[in-house]
Image (cartoon, grey):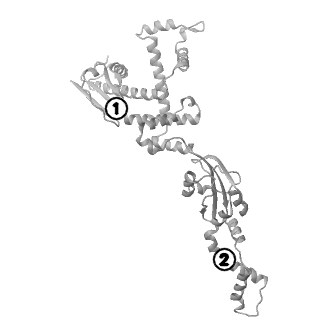
Amino acid sequence: MLLLIVISFGMPDFISSSAESSRLNAAKVDGQSVSLREVGILRNRMMEQYGADVSDAIRPMIEKQALEQAIYRKLFEIIVSDFQLYPTGKDANKVLAQFYKDNFQDFIVDGKFDFKKLDEFLGQRGNSRIEFEQSFLSDTALNRGQTLLQGSSIASQYDIIEGLRAEQTTVSFSAVILEPNQKNDWLTKNLNISEKEIQERFAKDYLSKDPKDTLSAIKREAIEKSIMNDKKPELEKTWAEDLIKKSNSLESLAALTGTKVYKWENLSIQKSFEQNKPAGAPNFASLDTNPQFQSALFTAETGKLQKPIIEGERTVFFVINKRNISSLPQVQKLVTDKELLKSTIASIADYDNRENTNKSKRYQEAFGIMMENFKANVQIVRYMNDTPAVN
């Protein structure tokens, strides 16, 4: 009796009950066959590991493990193929040459490799050189994939892509940071007190008590401070807007307040602005997490003075000079468009630059998320006979 089992990590598959489809195949992974011969080879290796005495109770377990290993290998082969990890051309020649040099030194005659001798050696074991090399290159590709998978970080595909979008998005901005004393100096300079106001306050506070009193320098200074304290709360409400109106640029604002303009150039928004601040800039740590500033990085009109950020007694005026947004699509689109997700991951995985430390890390991450995405959507069909022919 033939039992056909269809499983899917994420997608349903329709079932074909054709016995012919399973005559030579143990399973199909994404439409690609896993042959009974492949499963048989794996089964025989496992049997050798258990030794001569294999009980009837253990045999079904070995058969199942062999099938699952063959399926996983096929799944892995598909991903490895998508990532172009199979050595080809000069890469394949280099890999094979190194393999023969390391493992068949006896076949090197007068500095040259004797392929005729190799063909005889393989023929005696029922293999051809083409099959042998294809098998070795396939194993090399799988080993490369396994190495990448081991080096990939444990994170969702969307988290990694969103993180890469942030890493690739850079901003250039300028800022003027007013400390409390600088703000007070500006307020003091811009509090206009007329002589009429001074005389009215002198009459109210002094002449009302002593009509013969005179306005001395000390009393004038005290009256000016009193009027200033009365006016200051009202000026506090609009001083930042008034300062922006009087300035046509961040540079002129800095000149009016006696401060300095600090510039950040092409900095990834994922990096700390405090840790990458220009020399001499005051503490900037609070803006790394300030919602208003973080929003402005993405949405503020470039080249325009923005509404200042007030944090405690400090005031930050800033201009977004330039913004470079990553070309990677937003995660919302990737969630619903699997083909876009696949092409996006492929664009991250720059195989030609895999030796570069940063790109290698991204390639590892891309390989890992591609593997998880494929497993979540691949269709696997298992054909199981009561007495499978696995020889």
Q: Residues within 10 Å of mark 2 (few under 14, many from 20)?
A: few
Distance between the Cα atoms at labels 2 and 1?
A: 77 Å
Residue closest to the eye, 371 or 225:
225
Quarter of the figure that contains the C terminus: top left
- Please tell me whether residue 221 is drawn above or below residue 37 in the rendered image: below
Say which quarter of the image contains residue 228. Answer: bottom right
Q: Residues within 10 Å of mark 1 (few under 14, many from 20)?
A: many
Who's the residue at 71% across and 71% down the image? 188
> Is label 1 in a helix, a strand or a loop?
strand
Residue 133: give x, y in percent of width and height.
Answer: 47, 16
Residue position marked by numbered label 1 in the rendering: 379
Residue closest to the eye, 267 or 129:
267
Q: Quick check: marks 2 and 1 in contact, CB under 8 Å?
A: no
Of the residues shown, which amino acid type is indicated by label 1?
Gln
Residue closest to the eye, 357 or 86:
86
- Decide if residue 264 is on the left or right side of residue 295: right
> Is label 2 in a helix, a strand or a loop?
helix
Q: Residue furthest right?
A: 217
Who's the residue at 60% across and 65% down the image? 312
Residue position marked by numbered label 2 in the rendering: 229
- Please tell me whether residue 365 is drawn above or below residue 53 in the rendered image: below
- Decide if residue 83 is on the left or right side of residue 285: left
Residue 258: give x, y in percent of width and height.
Answer: 73, 62
Residue closest to the eye, 250 or 367:
250
- Please tell me whether residue 329 is drawn above or below residue 388 in the rendered image: below
Q: How many marks?
A: 2
Of the residues shown, which amino acid type is indicated by label 2?
Asn
- Decide if residue 288 is on the left or right side of residue 78: right
